Image (spheres, rainbow, N blue to C red):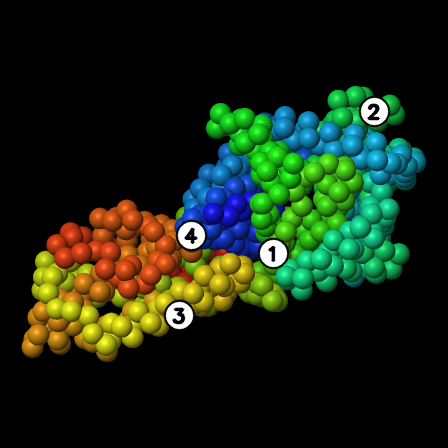
Amino acid sequence: MARILITSAIPYINGIKHLGNLVGSQLPADLYARFQRATGNEVMFLCATDEHGTPAELAAAKAGKPVAEFCAEMHAVQAKIAEGFGLSFDHFGRSSSPQNHALTQHFAGKLAEAGLIREVDDSQIYSHADGRFLPDRYVEGTCPNCGFEKARGDQCEECTKQLDPTDLINPRSAISGSTDLEVRATKHLFLCQSQMKDQLDAWINSKSDWPVLTTSIAKKWLHDGDGLQDRGITRDLDWGIPVKKGTEDWPGMEGKVFYVWFDAPIEYIAAAGEWAEANGKTDADWQRWWRTDMGADDVKYVQFMGKDNVPFHTLSFPATILGSGEPWKLVDHLKSFNYLNYDGGQFSTSQGRGIFMDQALEILPADYWRWWLLSHAPESSDSEFTWEQFQQSVNKDLADVLGNFVSRITKFCRSKFGEEVPQGGSYGDPEQALVTELTSRIQAYEQHMENMDVRKSAQELRAIWVAGNEYLQSTAPWSTFKSDPDQAAAQVRLGLNLIRLYAVLSAPFIPSASDSLMQALNCDDRSWPSDVAAALSMLSAGHGFQVPENLFAKITDEQREEWQARFAGTRD
């Protein structure tokens, strides 16, 4: 049994996430976690809300609530939506937790001891209208790299270039819109990433199985222009983790907090500590996942994220872990995704464009979205959501292929043999041919899933469903029944066992539908099929079942047109 540690990029607390966020991190991470559990491995799947920094303060101010209260409410909202989508986190934590406060301060202390943190007399934008310094996202303006006019002071959303607020052209306050700004002197701590360039380069070079997208982004940051730069890790904000050197005060840093990009990835580790506390576990129970001197040396650690998060996870977070000099677990595989665009434009939380996770669940069950998003995951390039494509894919794959197979075989059995697995007949060449095909396809499916090739996994699963339909078409038990009821019984028996096999194999993609099928079959044996022939004999003659309700209702043209019009604008 392997041990797999999985983290997906932690979503900002500043609002409900859109489908592009979902498919870029949490959903494929859940697919992988469910597959690994199903095949018998021990999994720790962690995520959290990213609660510090300017997005949290700005969103709380807009909502008219204290930031701590706003974050607590939004964490509960995001956790409920994640549950609605069937995201099977072992723990969904909070970066504002006591565990993350302590760990962040601990890492800062260790980095300081190693000579990897330096104090810098910095210049920062001060707003006269707001009477305060404006760190990172409190400043908006034109990107000096691509000319995007709504770039933020930490990163341009259009070209993904990392920025400082002072880099922006025509800067303005994100709070008041004021352009009455002044650059003032302040003091901050910087992580000396440049000192670790060669070590990080060698580590990235050792990852031969990473996606090209991941390594190309990391290499660009390491080598383009002046190469990897030192990066500020503190900010003049009220909300955040107070700057300390371990448990000691940090002279000259009073009133400052750690910058969100520094503390957010550390929450991956802290979330395991939160899991231990929430479940009555010991420190050793979570440290066996994260410390190589406590048992994590045999753990495979996999991260899932959108391409905009790659620099922080290939460079800054590893610099923090390596620089500490302590035996923390480094990521083994980083699966990154391109962007999912929405109907001719981009999804954008900040601009309220696209379908958001709560809205999606209001109009259709989660499995519809899970299937479409995963089968169209933006792996090799950006992909686009259109309502026409969504309707076509859901109707063809879920309703016509899987749903139709389940409906045909269960209803035919009920009409001719009653609601139990029929006895009689024996398996012959058609059945053996199906077993041979399924054995080959399931092996391919497992390999794609193991490789985290999401689209290929979906294509292979669909082909497995299609094989069952083709078997039904070729054997035609409704015709066989007229001349040889016993042989028709054998064909139906195989078909009912196929439903159970499909439920098990499909669970990582469509867990709710899988549960419905298992319930209809009165079966709780979800063992992964190591032997297809044996798996297709799991439900023996006389085993009772119920005909399931319509597994997937088709999306009508009227529904599609209504939703297209409803989501054409922006969210309030």
Q: Amino acid at mark 4?
A: Thr
The secondary structure type at the circle numbered 3 is: helix
User: Label 3 near label 2: C-beta < 8 Å?
Assistant: no
Q: Position of residue 426 (x, y in %)?
A: 15, 69
Residue 440, numbered circle: 3
- Mark 2 or mark 3, earlier in chain: 2
533 lies left or right of 214: left
What residue would you read off at disc 4?
39
281 lies left or right of 266: left
Q: Position of residue 80 (x, y in %)?
A: 46, 38
- Mark 4 or mark 1, earlier in chain: 4
What residue would you read off at disc 2?
250
User: Label 3 near label 1: C-beta < 8 Å?
Assistant: no
- Mark 4 or mark 3, earlier in chain: 4
Q: Is residue 530 visible?
A: yes
Q: Residue at x 51, y 48 (%)?
A: 2
Q: Residue at x 53, y 51 (%)?
A: 29
Q: Nearer the viewer, residue 113 or 105?
A: 113
User: Label 1 near label 4: C-beta < 8 Å?
Assistant: no
Mark 4 to mark 1 CA distance (whole Å) = 20 Å
Q: Amino acid at mark 1?
A: Lys
Query: Of discs 2 and 3, which sits in the foreground?
Result: 3
